[in-house]
Image (cartoon, coloured by chain):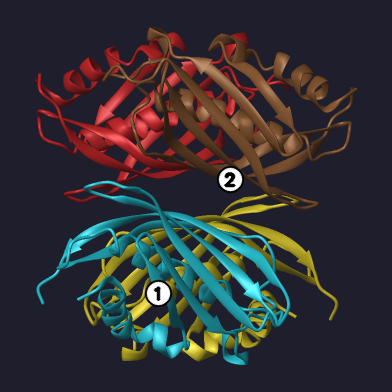
Chain colours: A cyan, B yellow, C red, D brown
Amino acid sequence: MDIFTQVAKSFENQAFMKTIGAKLDLVDEGRVVISVELKPSMMQQHGFGHAGVTFSIGDSAAGYAALTKMGKHQEVLTSEMKIHLMSPADGKILKAVGSVLKAGRRLLVVQSNIYSCDDKNEKHIATMLGTMVPSMVVD
Amino acid sequence: MDIFTQVAKSFENQAFMKTIGAKLDLVDEGRVVISVELKPSMMQQHGFGHAGVTFSIGDSAAGYAALTKMGKHQEVLTSEMKIHLMSPADGKILKAVGSVLKAGRRLLVVQSNIYSCDDKNEKHIATMLGTMVPSMVVD
Amino acid sequence: MDIFTQVAKSFENQAFMKTIGAKLDLVDEGRVVISVELKPSMMQQHGFGHAGVTFSIGDSAAGYAALTKMGKHQEVLTSEMKIHLMSPADGKILKAVGSVLKAGRRLLVVQSNIYSCDDKNEKHIATMLGTMVPSMVVD
Amino acid sequence: MDIFTQVAKSFENQAFMKTIGAKLDLVDEGRVVISVELKPSMMQQHGFGHAGVTFSIGDSAAGYAALTKMGKHQEVLTSEMKIHLMSPADGKILKAVGSVLKAGRRLLVVQSNIYSCDDKNEKHIATMLGTMVPSMVVD
């Protein structure tokens, strides 16, 4: 099972990613891209994408980037994550690029950058920095 | 307009809170409780509540706790937020208790504690610490 | 070797704690207090205690609080730590109270609250939230 | 007064930076490098540089990077800062590179990367992500 298939299989089982309509765009070793179309159901009170949506795809992108560094029968869990919301999520699509800063044996330091995209522009709206921990899974 | 009505009005406009079925349980000055029933649509790949759901209600509870410290025509925005996920969200209901640690003129330090609740037990599953900034709104 | 002696022994070997004149005031299970007298050599450009001093004692207090939850031949390392600086460190003494929120097998979630103290007052100037990881040591 | 002189003037007044022997190496707009020689007085109990030293120069580098984005009579204060310690500080020199991710009117999102340097190697040992707030100063 290649790395994309392994991540896609886990992604398929994330009901919440389906609920918000998130898509797995790209899986490289140490780098994963997830995107979501911003729908009215995902807004906060000012009509921008809710911070929880931005966090959700950023967290998943970072987690799957970590997963590409793990062995076959492992999963990862978010231990802690910090997000900076730098600009409103006012585009049509949000795109999260997760990557791995340091892959240790017991924990991985990961980051995620989230972009709000329109037809022409891509705006860097949020950055995340956190810790993933490996968890053994039984298939 | 009392403090509960003011917060409830803003909460009503948070489409994403409706989408996940979150409820505004309590509004005191500097303290807000939001809860959500964990449904299959909110799960991650292990069958527990997705970190994004926990983050979303925790962030909103902290933000509204901050709002209770602001003047009438203001709103707050999350500037940054850190979440520690300490135990799996495996209960029936998630409950977030947001509060204010320091209410400055230009920014507010807030925290949120999230509990996973069953019929008999309440487990502390996550803690959040972050910064809210006031934003002027025009009604 | 009791818990205070174990922590004191490790504290003695922290040259940097000696350099800034920090003292180990109290060691309970899951709770450690460290204080430091603010001297001119520890100031930043406004004449207040440098954030690095506040961080240093807060980090050590949190780490030793974690150590009280570990076995005899272990040490802990800071994996990551967040600090909120809420008020200037303008007192005579800084006091850090470290405690443990969650003691897991592979990592511990810790917090630290730092107070600036004068003859009569104690002001809450900073709060920290972070992750400690156990590390085996050979005596 | 050029940007290097402005930052150098403020750096000179940071007694704690002098105490630990930190040097201001480089000042560009939005980017500042500070280094420090690791001396026995700065160690923790395992003989590596104390997290507080790493934090101190990283925080100052990030703060001064923010200062280069401000007007003439302003200063900045650290509002909050997160540090990930990824490898032990076991080199001869620590070097912190601070930069600005987002310069807003009311707050700046900053980062700092810290390297442990020997004669031949440079190891990325820590990364920081935080918030600086402008503060008016009267000369």
Q: Which residue is at the front of the view, D14 or A10?
A: A10
What residue is shown at x 61% (from left), y 69% (from top)? A115
Where residue D128 sits in the image (x, y, percent)? 51, 41
State the residue at coordinates (61%, 65%): B29
Residue D68 lies in quadrant: top right
Q: Give the spatial CA distance, label 1 vs label 2.
A: 28 Å
Q: Amino acid at mark 2?
A: Gly
Tell me the crowding category of disc 1: few under 14, some 14 to 19, or many 20 or more residues within 10 angstroms, Cα based: many
Say which amino acid is labelled 1: Lys
The residue nearer to you, when weighing B83 against D120, is D120
Q: In screen coordinates, is D18 left or right of D86?
A: right
Label 2 residue SS: strand
Towards the viewer: A124 or D78: A124
Label 2: chain letter: D
Per the image, the residue denoted by label 1 is B95
Q: Chain of mark 1?
A: B
**Residue D80 point in image, percent of width and height:** 58, 43
Dot in front, 1 or 2:
2
Find residue D130 and name its label.
Answer: 2
Task: Using residue B55 as the reference point, say whether residue A75 is left or right of it.
Answer: left
Residue C120 at least partly seen? yes
Is A42 placed above or below A121 here? below
Q: Quadrant of residue D4?
A: top right
The C terminus of chain D sits in image quarter: top right
Give the quadrant of residue D7: top right
Q: Residue at x 72, y 49 (%)?
A: D107
Residue at x 26% of width, y 64% of height: A76
Query: Which quarter of the rendering shows the N terminus of chain D?
Result: top right
Q: Where residue C84 is drawn, which disc sits there?
A: none
Q: Dot 2, crowdedness within 10 Å: few (<14), some or many (≥20)?
A: many
Above-or-below relation of D3 to A128? above
